[in-house]
Image (tube, rainbow, N blue to C red):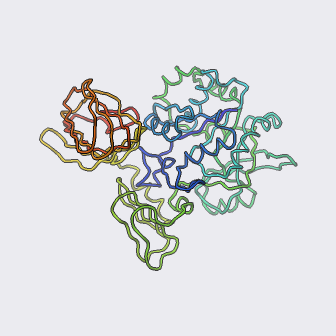
Amino acid sequence: MHTIFLCGGSGQRLWPLSGSIRSKMFLELLPAPAGGTESMIGRVCRQLHQAGLDQSSLFVTHKDQLGLMQRHTRGEYPVIGEPFKRGTFTAAALGALYLYSSGTAKPEDTLCVAPADMYADDGFFRLFHQFSDVLAESKADLVLLGTRPAHPTDQYGYIVPGNAAGKRYSPVISFAEKPDTAKAEELIGRNALWNCGVFAFPLRFMLAHLQQMGLPVELAAFTERYPGFPVRSFDKEIAERSNKAVVLRHEGEWLDLGSWGSLTAQLAEPVVGAGGIWGECRNTHIVNELDIPLHVIGLSGVVAVSGPEGILLARKEDANGIKEIIQDASAEPRYGETKWGSYTVLDRTPSRAGLILTLKLSLLPGQTLPEQLCHHSSKSWMILSGDGAVILNGLTTEAQSGRIFTISRGDSHGITAVTAMKLIEIRALEEEDDQPIYSSSVHL
């Protein structure tokens, strides 16, 4: 069996810490078993190893997060990048065709498609080993995972199962995608399960479906047509159209940590970062990525979050409203993470020629900003801390605290960190310069 983990969401409900550059799965906030914290993706990778699934897993993410995903999976898993975000069905098909074209998976093999940002107990992943047997025993095209609802909610989809007849699986009668609370209560009365977004099927099933849609089953041809694909959901395209689907029931823990309310419930401490909670406060949390202290006095049921992208103060029950507020925002991101480290925009000042952009870069030990040509009018690097080497037009110079390097248009330049490094970068940009600040495919 092969598992394809989809990593396409932007997590706007967890703004200001999550967005288009850094998805929620990369937030290192969850308590780790050995102490300290881990990200959602780090937790999933740890559980895959424990469940014996690490040698058969593939991660599919957007190309702009390719390097960041490789960093968080520590290079231990294959990761491929989508050229464009086209929905869960298209991403799943890309992963399936990658496995098929590389010879990793045969048409008779079982594929599992799952979200990479789930929060579940270890037993959840051990259920994956049953998929092949359930497909063979049930003669179904599709196996899903469902879990018992903890309460009625409009945040999850529901699966209505039929009679299990003593088997470990049940036939799927119908689906309901994020119903209102009243409908959710009715569905729970019919023994409906929360839909965990996990689907298993034979590879030949996906290949046949693509052919029926008139789509290529060759990876290169499929990728070439990617820009013209509409956004397609796996639920809508596959699951809800299937009349031969069954569901396995998971009896343990499963959550979608897609809101500040659900995420803060898993934190080890009520305050993360600089600041404090004072007075009569119940169920209040602070998550602060800034060096500036953040204090909350006498407010219950609120979350206070601050980061380079902004500050959020909201009642937990209302915090999801931030998604509608920022969904049309077109401002350039102020913070981003990459394979080599992270960057923060400190200042944008207009100039006669265009813009002076000031950044703070943090490089991880042993990581490199590869040599590339400077496309800006000029650039300066001032080393704040750490040790490394700057390569400028083929010459390597030791880089230590206090050193300043001046780079002109057309200069080839790069930097390698021996220890963790911090530096200030100042760019002189012209008006027509619309290159991204930094991404997985590094722009210097």
Q: Residue at x 61, y 45 (%)?
A: 46
> Does residue 77 appear to the left or right of 136 in the view shown?
left
Q: Nearer the viewer, residue 86 or 360?
A: 360
Looking at the image, the residue that sits furthest to the bottom is 280
Residue 398: x, y in percent?
28, 34
Residue 364: x, y in percent?
40, 41
Q: Is residue 1 above or below residue 43?
A: above
Residue 68: x, y in percent?
46, 39
Q: Nearer the viewer, residue 247 or 266?
A: 266
Q: Is residue 291 above or below residue 241?
A: below
> Does residue 361 appear to the left or right of 263 in the view shown?
left
Quadrant where the C terminus lies?
A: top left
Picture quarter containing residue 422? top left
> Does residue 420 appear to the left or right of 240 in the view shown?
left
Residue 135: x, y in percent?
77, 35
Looking at the image, the residue that sits furthest to the right is 166
Q: Residue at x 27, y 50 (%)?
A: 346
